[in-house]
Image (cartoon, grey):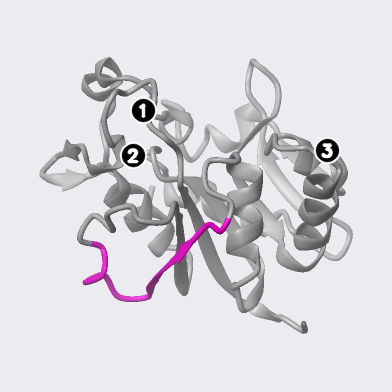
Amino acid sequence: MTLDDHGVEAIVLAGGRSARFGRDKLAEPIDGQPLLRHAISAVGVVADRVVVVAAPGTVTLAIDDLDRVSIVHDPRPHEGPLAGLATGLAVVRVDRVIVVAGDMPSLVPAVLRRLLAALDPEVEAAVLGSERGAVPLPMALRATTGRAAAGALLAGGERRLRALPDALRTTVIPEPEWRLDDPGAATLRDIDVPGDIPLTNPGVASDA
């Protein structure tokens, strides 16, 4: 498939079990909106279309009313984020993709733009550096090579999303550089347990 290299699409991974949270965390209200909507709003600032990858039978969290948002159901539910990403990559129409998790409520669009800008003919993926090392999400990705690499990894039994940037020509944006756009590192926050919610400060619709 030949993909357009001019547009940008986003993949939001929303197929997890929420086992540690104890209930569907993506439906949890934050600032009057479900958690999932915050991630969608952030990537919607930088992407022309948003693809939400959900497990079959899951509630769509009233996101059907959002413009430029498509929902696809993972045929291999609960097999991990790499399988979910492969499902999303199968339906994108452009080659430049930003990938995030649905439980990231405070993504900063300027950081996402920085990741996308790092893609060039020699770079197939871009991730953020941190004091813990490179983190797999958010990630900018070239869909053509990302799809092939994800398929090969899954065929070999791999399920970790972290394995994908290791299999591609990936650049890591140093933390001091991306923190110019996000001094508090809000972009890396995610929600794992209910106690994480008061610690977040979702301001994702603003373009920092």
**Three-letter code, disc 3:** Asp
Q: Nearer the viewer, residue 205 or 197?
A: 197
Image quarter hosting the N terminus: bottom right
Residue at label 2?
105
Which is nearer the N-term, disc 2 or disc 1?
Answer: 2
Which is nearer the N-term, disc 2 or disc 3?
Answer: 2
**Three-letter code, disc 1:** Ile
Residue at label 1?
191
| Snapshot quadrant of residue 166 | top right
Task: Report the Cα–Cα distance between label 3 and label 1.
Answer: 25 Å
Is 162 situated above or below 86?
Answer: above
Residue at label 3?
166
Asked if the stretch drawn in magenta spans residue 64, the answer is: yes
**Three-letter code, disc 2:** Pro
Left or right: 200 as drawn, with respect to 178: left
Task: Report the Cα–Cα distance between label 2 and label 3.
Answer: 26 Å
Q: Position of residue 64 (x, y in %)?
A: 26, 69
| Snapshot quadrant of residue 80 | top right
- What span is in magenta? 63-75
Please rate how many residues cluster around mark 1, counting C-alpha atoms within 10 Å: few if below 14, some from 14 to 19, many from 20: many
Q: Can residue 205 be seen in this view?
A: no
**What residue is shown at x 28% (from left), y 52% (from top)?**
37
Please rate how many residues cluster around mark 3, counting C-alpha atoms within 10 Å: few if below 14, some from 14 to 19, many from 20: few
**What residue is shown at x 26% (from left), y 30% (from top)?**
23
**What residue is shown at x 29% (from left), y 35% (from top)?**
25
Q: Main secondary structure of the magenta part?
A: loop
| Snapshot quadrant of residue 156 | top right
Is 172 situated above or below 169?
Answer: above
